[in-house]
Image (spheres, rainbow, N blue to C red):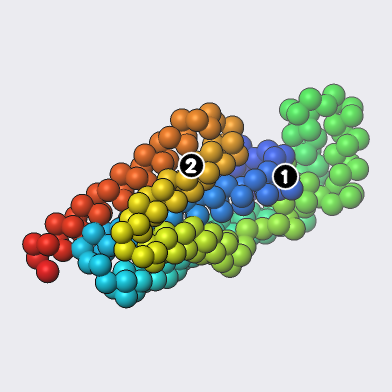
Amino acid sequence: MTDVAAREHEHGDMETGDGLSNRLTWLRAGVLGANDGIVSVAGIVMGVAGATADRGDILIAGVAALVAGALSMAAGEYVSVSTQRDAERALITAERHDLERMPAEELDQLREMLESRGLSTEVAREAAEQLTEWDALRVHANLEFGIDVDDVANPWSAAAASALSFTLGALLPLLTIMLPAGGRVWATVLAVAAALALTGWTSARLGYASPGRAMLRNVAGGVLAMLVTWGIGNLLGTTVV
Ligand SMILES: [Zn+2]
């Protein structure tokens, strides 16, 4: 284990790389992306709908908001996951070198890590030897850094997933605001409120938080955003345009 890595990654644990927690992470990211898509596109189409009754204008604004939001989410996710991937790769490379250059020290380190996780010295020594023979790099990467060597973060799939989830969320207000004038504003408010209740509830459940409050906060935030942009659109639509 390298010195820098040791200092920066003492928190490494067995949970990362576990299939279930990985799926939960993805699910949580998907729900948050959908939530973003719902709130930001709802705000924009409501703002435009407050200013004009022209469905074409509302549609153009909504589609532009959807595309811009999805691309911005994808770009942000790509950058952040690329950085994470580079860091994971650098740690794995450093660990591979250490294992080649000083196998005895690494074996000792593995035994200590196993002991600190509750094994007796004798059992830890035996386990360290067996694990080293099985796949030293995999075991060190997992125990020291919480990295699964087969599952290094992938920036492209992360970018695609967040663009997709944003788009799915954005489609809801985009479709409801295309309903005939008269009902469309209320239909959008109701549909968005219901969808935000669902995403709020789901992300709270995934995070083991209390679903009731999370739902309320999420709905209140989204409805407030729609009211504000609708009000601004109304003001600008009647005074400026
Ligand atoms: Zn090591």
Out of 208 and 113, give the one closest to the viewer.
Answer: 208
As drawn, is 5 to the left or to the right of 108? left
Tell me the tag on residue 20.
1
> Is the distance from the Cβ of mark 1 to the nearest ligand 1 atom less than 8 Å?
no
9 with respect to 92 (left or right):
left
Q: How many neighbours does mark 2 have within 10 angstroms: few (below 14), some (14-19), or many (20 or more)?
A: many
Q: Nearer the viewer, residue 10 or 215?
A: 215
Q: Are marks 1 and 2 in contact (CB under 8 Å)?
A: no
Q: Is residue 214 visible?
A: yes
In the image, what residue occupies the spot 41% across and 36% down?
A: 217
Q: Is residue 84 left or right of residue 228?
A: right
Location of residue 86 in the rendering, given as x and y in whole percent from the top left corner: 57, 61
Q: Is residue 141 visible?
A: no
Q: Residues within 10 Å of mark 1 (few under 14, many from 20)?
A: few
* Sequence-earlier tag: 1 or 2: 1
User: Which mark is on residue 220?
Assistant: none
Q: Is mark 2 within 8 Å of ligand 1?
A: no
Residue 27 appears at what percent x and percent y?
Answer: 61, 50
Q: Which residue is mark 2?
A: 197
Question: Tag count in the figure?
Answer: 2
